[in-house]
Image (cartoon, rainbow, N blue to C red):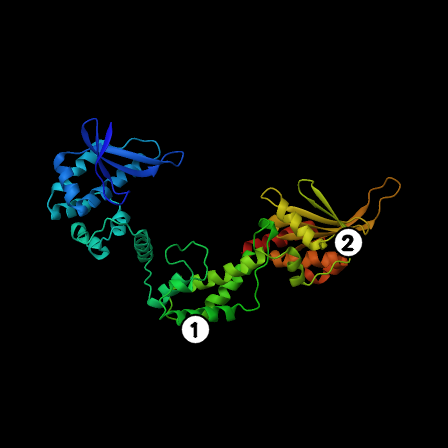
Amino acid sequence: MRDIVFARRSGWIPNVIREDGELKLMLGAGADANHEPRTFTFPIGEAHLTVIQEDLARHLLLWSAVLPLCDAAGTRGRLDEEAAVALLDPVLLSAPEDVDALFRRIPWDRARLVAHGADTRLLERGQVCAALRAATETSDGKRAQEDHAHRRRAERGVVLGPLDTALLKYTGQYLHGAAVPKRIPGAVDPALLPEVVRVIATAEQACAGMRIGRDPRRGKRATDKRDWDRMAKAVETAVRRARPGLAEDAVRTVSFLMCSEAAERARNSSLDDDEEAVGGSARKTALSFTDDKGVERKWRRGHPRTATAEFWEFVGERSAGDNEVFTIEDEEMGEGVQLHFYADSIARVTTVRKGEGGSDPEYRVEYSLVDGMDGYRKLVSAFVGGGCAALGPYGSWIPDAAEFERARRRRRAAG
C-alpha cells in the first residue's frame, strides 16, 4: 500500500510517500534498459518530512545530492540506500555553513538547482544554501542549459561578448554547439540584430559563387569535405578581417551556418546538377559501371539521366569501406577507367590489340593521382564526354605501376 504524503507542484521534485506504514522519499531518475523511467525510494523520518514540507531550498538540495546516487545505480542496479539515508541529516537538519561544507565534498547535480532558480554566482562560491533563497518550485530547463553552456565555454577559456552571444543565438548554437545551425533572428536582442545581420552579410559575400558538391564516395547524401573546408576558410578569414574582436566560437558558428546551408542545397540537388557545374556532356552511346563486388549497371544513350549522374548514383549506393574500386567501361570502343577511392588514384585502360584466334587482347594501362572529389568529377565527366583521349589534360599519366606507386607514396608522405 502506497500513499502520497507530500508533493510539490513540479512532478519531478521528489515526493514523500508512506509505504507499508513507513515514510519514504520517492524520486524518478534515469532510465532502465528499455528506456523507461526508473523510480527509487529510501526511508526518511518525521523530522525530515517537516523540513521537506517547510523549506523548498533544503528539499531541492537533498534532491541534488541524491541524484548522483541514482545515476550510479545505472539501468538495473539498486540505489545505495545507506548512502542516501546518510545524506538526510547533513542536508536537511544541519546549519547552512555545514551544508555548504558538505556540498564541497560530495557530488551533486548543479543543473537541478539552477533550473529551480539558484543564483549561479553564489553556487560558484560554494554558498549553496544562500544560492537557493529565491528558489522556485517551477523549473526553467533553458536556464540550466545556458548555465551548462557557459561553464563549458569557461573551461575552454572562452569569454563571449554581446555580439558573440547574439551570433550564437542567431544560429541556434548558443546552447548546443553541435546542433545544425539555422537562422533564428527572433532569438537575438533587437538592438543587436542589425549588427548580426551585417556580420552574416560579410560571410555571404565571402562565399558568393562557392559551392559544396556531393561526395558519392561517402554515401548518397554525403557532401565534399574539401569544398566545405574551402568555404569555411573563406568565410572565417573575411569575418575575422571585418570583425577582429569576435570570439572564435562566434566566427565558427557563422562559417558553420554558411557551409551547412550550402551542403543542404547540394543534398537537395540532383547529381545532374553536379555534372553541369563541372561542364560535362556525354558523347558515349553505351557504358557499363561495375564495383569491386562484381555488381554491374548499364547505361545507354536515351536514358533519362546523364551517364555521369547515373554513375555517381551507382557509387553513392554501392560505395563502402570494403568497396572502393569502381569502373566505367565502353566495350564498343575498348576503353575504360578504374577509380581507386582508397588511394585517390585512377587508371585509364585502352585496348591496343583485340584478342584474335584465341590470343589474349593487349591493353595499355596508365595511372594518375586524383585531387579529391572535384578531381574525380572532372575525370569522369571528361571520359564520358570524350573517352580516354580526353583525359590527357586532367592528370600526369604514368604507364609504369611501380613508378606510380612510388609517386603515390611520396604524396602520402608529404601529407
**Sequence-first tag of 2 and 1:** 1
Which is nearer the eye, 205 or 346? 205
Circle 1 SS class: helix
User: Which amino acid type is shown beneath numbered disc 2?
Assistant: Gly
Position in image of residue 184 (x %, y %): 43, 62
Q: Residue furthest right?
A: 357
User: Across the whole image, how many numbered discs are drawn on residues?
Assistant: 2
Q: Is residue 170 left or right of residue 207?
A: left
- Residue drawn at x 64%, y 55% is 271
Which is nearer the eye, 389 or 159? 159
Q: Nearer the viewer, mark 2 or mark 1?
A: 2
Tag shown at residue 302: 2
Q: Quadrant of the N terminus?
A: top left
Q: Is residue 401 above or below residue 37?
A: below
Position in image of residue 326 (x %, y %): 67, 47
Query: What is the CA distance from the residue labelled 2 to the residue labelled 1?
Result: 51 Å
Asked whether residue 181 appears in the rendered view, the answer is yes
Tag shown at residue 118: none
Position in image of residue 48 (x %, y %): 14, 38
Which is nearer the eye, 395 or 196? 196
Circle 2 SS class: loop
In the rendered image, which residue does mark 1 sit on? 242
Position in image of residue 348 (x %, y %): 72, 53
Q: Is residue 42 left or right of residue 198?
A: left
Q: Is residue 356 above or below residue 168?
A: above
User: Which amino acid type is shown beneath numbered disc 1?
Assistant: Ala
Q: Is residue 2 above or below residue 158?
A: above
